[in-house]
Image: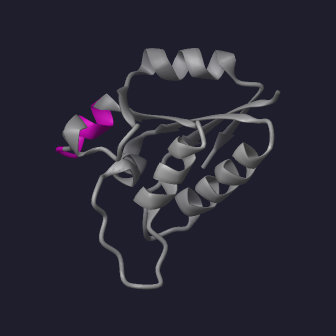
Amino acid sequence: MAKYLFILNDAPYGTERSYNALRLARKLLEGQAEVRMFLMGDAAACAAAGQKVPQGYYNIGDMLGAVIRRKGEVSVCGTCMDARGMAEDRLVGGATRGTMDILTEWTEWADKVLVF
C-alpha cells in the first residue's frame, strides 16, 4: 500500500493549490493508498471549521473533512496556528494540532511527499 504525505503551504482560497491537493488526496484514498496531510503557513486556515463560501463555490473545510472521513490523517502546524490566532477547538473535526516532530515522523513514514 502506497503512503503519501501532502504538505500544504497556500491559503485555502486565492489560489487553487490547496484545492488541487485535496482533490488528489481524496482520489488516492479511493484506492489502497494511505494519506497524511500536514498544513503549514497560510494553509493552516484550510482547517478552520465553519467556513462560509458563496453557493456553488468549493469549501476547503468540507473537502478536508472528506479526506478525514476516508481515513486520511490531518495535522496543522501549531506555530502557524498561533501566528494566525487559531485555537485547536476551531479546527475541522478530526484535524489535530501538529509539530515539526510530527512532520518529521510523517516524512520518514511516507513513500512519496507532495508539496503544494
The outermost residue toward the front is: 69
Up the image or down, 62 lies above or below 114; here it is below
Q: Quadrant of residue 51?
A: bottom left
Q: With 61 as the anchor, is 85 left or right in this view? A: left
What residue lies at 46% left-to-right and 79% top-to-bottom?
57
Q: Residue at x 68, y 41 (%)?
A: 114
The quadrant of the image that shows the N terminus is: top right
Magenta span includes 105: no
Is residue 82 inside the magenta stretch? yes
Could you tell me what secondary structure mostly forms the magenta stretch? helix
Image quarter of residue 115: top right
Residue 22 image point, x, y percent: 59, 54
Q: Is residue 14 above or below residue 88?
A: below
In the rendered view, would you say 54 is above or below 4?
below
In terms of depth relative to the viewer, which is nearer, 33 or 16? 33
Q: Residue at x 42, y 40 (%)?
A: 40
**Which of the two residues, 59 or 45, is positioned nearer the viewer here?**
59
Residues in magenta, as a range: 79-85
Q: Position of residue 20 (x, y in %)?
A: 63, 61
- Residue 102 percent location from the top left of the image: 47, 19
Residue 46, given in percent of the width and then of the height, sits at 40, 53
Q: Is residue 68 left or right of residue 27?
A: left
Quarter location, residue 37: top right
Query: Looking at the image, which is closer to me, 105 or 54?
Result: 54
Q: Residue at x 70, y 24 (%)?
A: 110
**In the image: residue 32, left or right of residue 106:** right
